Image (cartoon, coloured by chain):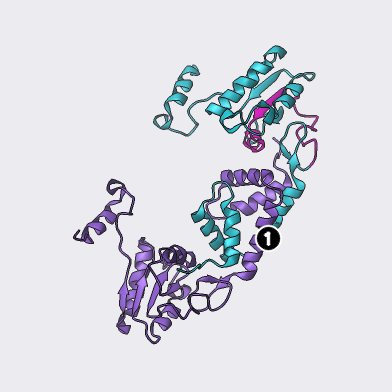
Chain colours: A purple, B cyan
Amino acid sequence: MKELRPAAVRELLTHLERLPGIGPRSAGRLVEHLLTCAPDEPARLGEALVTLRERVRLCSTCFLLTEEDPCPVCSDPERDRSTILVVESPTTAWPVEATGEYNGLYHALLGHLSPLHGVGPEDLTIDQLLQRARGEGVREVILATNPTVEGETTALYIARRLEPLGLTVSRPASGIPVGGEVSAVDQVTLAQALQLRRRV
Amino acid sequence: MKELRPAAVRELLTHLERLPGIGPRSAGRLVEHLLTCAPDEPARLGEALVTLRERVRLCSTCFLLTEEDPCPVCSDPERDRSTILVVESPTTAWPVEATGEYNGLYHALLGHLSPLHGVGPEDLTIDQLLQRARGEGVREVILATNPTVEGETTALYIARRLEPLGLTVSRPASGIPVGGEVSAVDQVTLAQALQLRRRV
């Protein structure tokens, strides 16, 4: 049995397989694509990778990804400073913003509470959130952590810590995804959707 | 609604989303990983991408990926030169070789026949295969194209063109994957597995 994979392929494969969601088979397919795509494409992807790490950092206020600190949201005088929407991961703010329904501020926790993995409150940006919530004019904190066990736990923990401040603390509704099928929705979501039913 | 994704992130996302099997969501997850992993990792991945394109090419005889031409298999005096195993894609030779069951030569077609997508015999390395098959000492050609409509068509086409040479032309068996469940196998595969049944 011979090693058929050239050294440069093996080197790239070890890097690719470290990426989340990429197993040996998809890494192989990526290598094939990268060998057959436009000749300058891999180099341009390589440059974009280096630039990313050089330019992008976390906003020191809200922890969204940004090239300037404070980020464009935190420094925008047009945003509604009375509301802070809390997400687990900075990139979750992107689809929220894309709805066009939200004009307040954001706060990324950089994860969720997970005692099993040794992630406690001090590993997230919860203290920074509390400090912001104590600031002038803040009236509502929307806890848009994921509706998973960890996300719910994190939301509950933060809600309890926000309690003394007397703010409105809310959570987005869970329910049947628009365009989805009732029969395809899990029991827990369906139960939530029924509890949150609205008159038509 | 604001553009929350920094320019360097958008640039990387456009490159990532061009890769096969990577949609907007997995691209987002990759960006997050690349921003939080070891600081030198993205640059090392970038280098590996550039090196790949500089060093790796196709063997001019068998069209496997290689850094030297002819490739290590074609130039190895220990390989059995009487057998050529034909694969659609160069990387498919890797798992075949990893079985340790095969010691012959390879030939990558660089695709399969697909009239709908305008891929005819002249777009593959079929002529080169025929030329090799005519060479001295070749006795068997194993057509290990995928057991898909396109792969079967390609195998049939090549088998017909090889016919005048009087070689053994074979195809790997289709059947129930080892470790799989009989009930999980599709009808066509199951029918093949039954036809190819062996006495125990």
Label 1, secondary structure: give it. helix
Residue at position x 76%, y 36% in the image: B59
Residue B82 on the magenta segment: yes
Residue at position x 32%, y 68% in the image: A171
- Between A7 and A174, the residue placed more toward the observer is A174
Vertical position of residue A137 compared to residue B130: above or below: below
Residue at position x 46%, y 33% in the image: B180
Q: Which residues are magenta?
A: B68-97
- Between A81 and B70, the residue placed more toward the observer is A81
Q: How far from the left and from the top, in percent, is residue A97?
A: 44, 66
Vertical position of residue A119 compared to residue A33: above or below: below
- Residue identified by numbered label 1: A47
In the rendered image, which quarter is residue A15 located in?
bottom right
Vertical position of residue B33 compared to residue B80: above or below: below
Q: How far from the left and from the top, in percent, is residue B81?
A: 76, 24
**Residue B82 at least partly seen:** no
Specify the subunit that label 1 lies on.
A
Q: Amino acid at mark 1?
A: Glu
**Residue A102 at least partly seen:** yes
Q: How far from the left and from the top, in percent, is residue B33?
A: 55, 61
Farthest bottom residue in view: A136
Residue B59 horizontal side relative to residue A106, left or right: right
The mark total stands at: 1
Residue B24 horizontal side relative to residue B86, left or right: left
